[in-house]
Amino acid sequence: MKDGKRLVLYIDDDDDALFAIRAVLEAQGYAMAGASSAEEGLRIYKALNPDFVIVDLMMEEVDSGASFARELKALGNKAPVYMLSSVGDDLSTTTDSVALGLDGVFQKPLDAATLLSVLKTRLMA
């Protein structure tokens, strides 16, 4: 939590996507920490201990999102982690989401209503 609000860490190298999701989250009472690389996201994760994590699959390196998810799992992460992918439903057949420590996959571009519904369900206290 940050300032009494649930904190979402969103990692994406697309600045426009970060800006758009921040606007959606903050309008609904969430706090957001944004990172433009998996490396930066890992630093922020360790510093802030977010309640929910969204990471883009393909950023500066092809599988940097998957590597980030594996690192969180190795750290004993308890927050829900969702991968963001533009490859769609094929990701679920080509990627072992459990092995990566993922709780789910969002399709890119990220639909605000879907995101808010998942957050509401996953972050019920």
Image (cartoon, grey):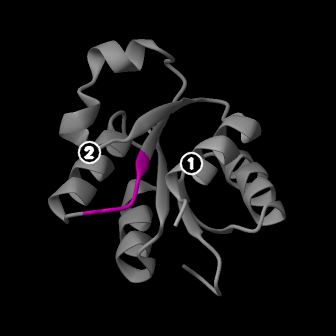
Q: Amino acid at mark 1?
A: Thr
- Residues 38 and 117: in front is 117
Q: Is residue 104 visible?
A: yes
Instruction: Report the side of 24 relative to 96 (left or right).
Output: right
Read off the residue under disc 1.
121
Quadrant hosting residue 34: bottom right
Q: Which residues are magenta?
A: 77-81
Residue occupying the far front of the picture: 125
- Sequence-earlier tag: 2 or 1: 2
Q: Quadrant of the N terminus?
A: bottom right
Q: Nearer the viewer's eye, disc 2 or disc 1? A: 1
- Tell me if residue 3 comes above or below residue 121 in the rendering: below
Q: Is residue 79 magenta?
A: yes
Local crowd at mark 1 within 10 Å, few (<14), some, or many (≥20)? few
| The label number, if any, that marks residue 101 in the structure image | 2
Badge 2 element:
loop
The answer to whether the residues at label 2 and label 1 have Cβ atoms under 8 Å apart is no
Residue at 47% x, 70% y: name it.
Answer: 50
Residue at image coords 40%, 49%: 81
39 inside magenta stretch = no
Q: Could you tell me residue 58's position as x and y percent?
A: 44, 35
Q: Residue 73 placed where, x, y %? A: 21, 55
Is residue 12 visible to the viewer in this orientation of the structure? no
Image vertical order of residue 51 relative to residue 67, above or below: below
